[in-house]
Image: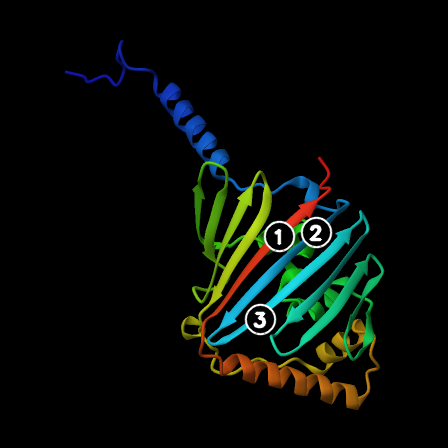
Amino acid sequence: MKLSLKSKTSPPMKTIIALLLSTAAVFAQENAIVLDPGYKAGEYSFSGTVETEMGAFKTTHTFTGKTKHDSFECSWVNDMGVMKTQGKVKVDKQGGTMAMDGMAEQKFTDPAMAIASATGVSGGSVHLMYALWTGEQSSVLPTQNVKITKLEDKTEVSGDNGSKARHSVVTIVAGMVVSVKSEFDPSLEKKPAEEPEMSEQQIKDALKAMGKPETQEEIDKLKEMMKRAQNSMANLKDKITTTTKVTVTGLPK
């Protein structure tokens, strides 16, 4: 006796497959995170705060900025309790500048280098807002072990950024990022046996991008700065928790 897969009461296999694919597509669409397209190369203003805690050390950054289709600028004030520092970065297609209290304005031929120079001193606010403006969604949202939680009026995207040591939760309302909470746990960070060193040519390229002369003095200064930064990261023991809150006005619709 032959068994038939066909049945008068069962739908054809093609129909079942089509239904499954359709359901999967809808599910994927519902769970895809799409930030407001008006961020990218749009004209708007923004402001916010960055609260950072590392053990007993706490600091607060406030930041403001504005964008045009072809330029981005952001200024910030860092309140460390006993003193305040402030700075500003501005970039366009030709390059950028960054200035801080007590420091001569630095000029860069590469906009990305100007943004990088302002990222740490601005509490990460410059990096976040520039990534939104350039449309680099992967620089805003976590990329590994991603979990999406949809609530009544907001969506939370949580996950890791490069490693389990770097975890973040991004809160989105109507396609707009309203807060980012990040945690860095140095005890979970895998450290290489030996830190890779930049070649002489890479160092010269970095100096050129910063608008500085490729002299031996400047090369030595950059090497020393990088060495201090690596030592600081290697000696970290306390968790670093950063909470950024953002308000954007005038976003194109």
Which residue is painted at 58% across and 71% down in the image?
59
Q: Position of residue 8 (x, y in %)?
A: 27, 9
Is disc 2 in contact with disc 1, using a CB cutoff of under 8 Å? Answer: yes
State the residue position of label 3: 59
Q: Give the amino acid at mark 3.
A: Thr
* Of callouts 1 and 3, the N-terminal one: 3
Residue 237 sits above or below residue 252 on the image: below
Q: Which mark is residue 176?
A: none
The local secondary structure at tag 1 comes to: strand
Q: Amino acid at mark 2?
A: Phe
Mark linked to residue 46: 2
As drawn, is 199 to the left or to the right of 56? right
Q: Earlier in the sequence, mark 2 or mark 1?
A: 2
Whether pointer 1 and pointer 3 mark residues with C-beta atoms closer than 8 Å, the reply is no
In the depicted view, which residue is nearer to us: 189 or 214? 189
Dot 2 or dot 3: first in sequence order is 2
Q: Which mark's residue is nearer the viewer, 2 or 3?
A: 3
Which mark, residue 246? 1
Residue 237 versus residue 16 in the image, above or below: below
- Residue 2 rendering spot, x and y as whole percentages: 18, 17
Q: CA distance from mark 2 to mark 1?
A: 7 Å
Disc 1 from disc 3: Cα separation:
17 Å
Q: Residues within 10 Å of mark 3 (few under 14, many from 20)?
A: some
**Total residue callouts:** 3
